[in-house]
Structures are given as C-alpha cells and as structure tokens.
Image: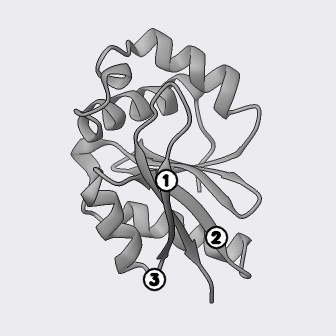
Amino acid sequence: MADYDISTVAAVWYRAGIDAYPYLPGWQNMTPELALEVFCQHIAPHCDVYVIEHQGTIAGYLALKGSYVDRLYIDPGSQALGLGTALIEHARRLQPEGLELHTHQQNVTACAFYERLGFVAVRYGVSPPPESAPDVEYHWRP
C-alpha cells in the first residue's frame, strides 16, 4: 500500500461517492471542498488509511478502525480491476480473525462485491443521520 496525499484520497472518495450514491441527497449535494474537510476531520484522524495505486496514481483507499471497514472506495474509472479485492485482502492480513462493515442496501454493487468475497449479511437496519438510509451489516470470518 502506498503513502498518500490527503487531498488526492478525499477526491477519490468524493468521485466514488457521487457515482455510488445517486439515492442519497447529501452525497449529491457534496462538493469536493466539503469532502476534503470531512475526510480531514472525521475519517483520517480516526482510521488507519491505506491507499492503492493504479497506473501511478491513487485509485482507491481503505479506512480501518481495528477490524471495522469504515470506508472502502475505488475511483469510478479504476473499478473492476481487482483493487477493492486487494484492499480487502490487505485488511484480512491485518485482521485475520475477521472484519465487519456496513453498506447501504441500495448499493447493490457493494453488496455483491462483499458477498463475493465471503462476507455474510448479519443485520439489516438504518444508517445514522444524516443519511438515515436502509443499510446492511456484513461480517467476514475465516
């Protein structure tokens, strides 16, 4: 995993979120500047952040809080290249006893991705505000 420039990683998060969440008004109203601010204040200080490069540029990132996958985003132009799988494999090496995460039920691409990698849905609920959208909790156990 490569070192990272926080503004580049926040930009990946912004582009991937805009692409993945057409059903979340908060995301559709997000700006690149706000994404950078949120990333700097709420993600980077509280997570271990790992980035992955493709063709010499940061193409995705994983934010871990212990065994919890807090975030996993791949730039839309770099998806379906195995980068997300590589980040999950990295997380598995770091947390060999298991991983947990949440994603939105409407994010069928993410749900299929995690299920393909052996994650199992263990609970359905609603994400906290401001999203307040139906979500699903996944666990992976070796």
Q: Name the residue nearer the viewer: 112 or 51.
A: 112
Q: Which residue is mark 3?
A: 118
Q: List x then y, in percent, for residue 53.
A: 44, 50
Residue annotated with mark 1:
125
Q: Indicate the secondary structure of the residue bearing disc 1.
A: strand
Residue in the image at 33% along x and 49% along y:
55
Q: Quadrant of residue 128?
A: top right
* Quadrant (top left, top right, bottom left, bottom right) of the N terminus: bottom right
Asked whether 119 or 33 is in front, the reply is 119
Q: Nearer the viewer, mark 3 or mark 1?
A: 1
- Dot 1, crowdedness within 10 Å: few (<14), some or many (≥20)? some
- Residue for badge 2: 99
Amino acid under disc 3: Gly
* Residue 41, picture quadrant: top right
Q: Residue furthest bottom?
A: 142
Q: Is residue 21 left or right of residue 132?
A: left
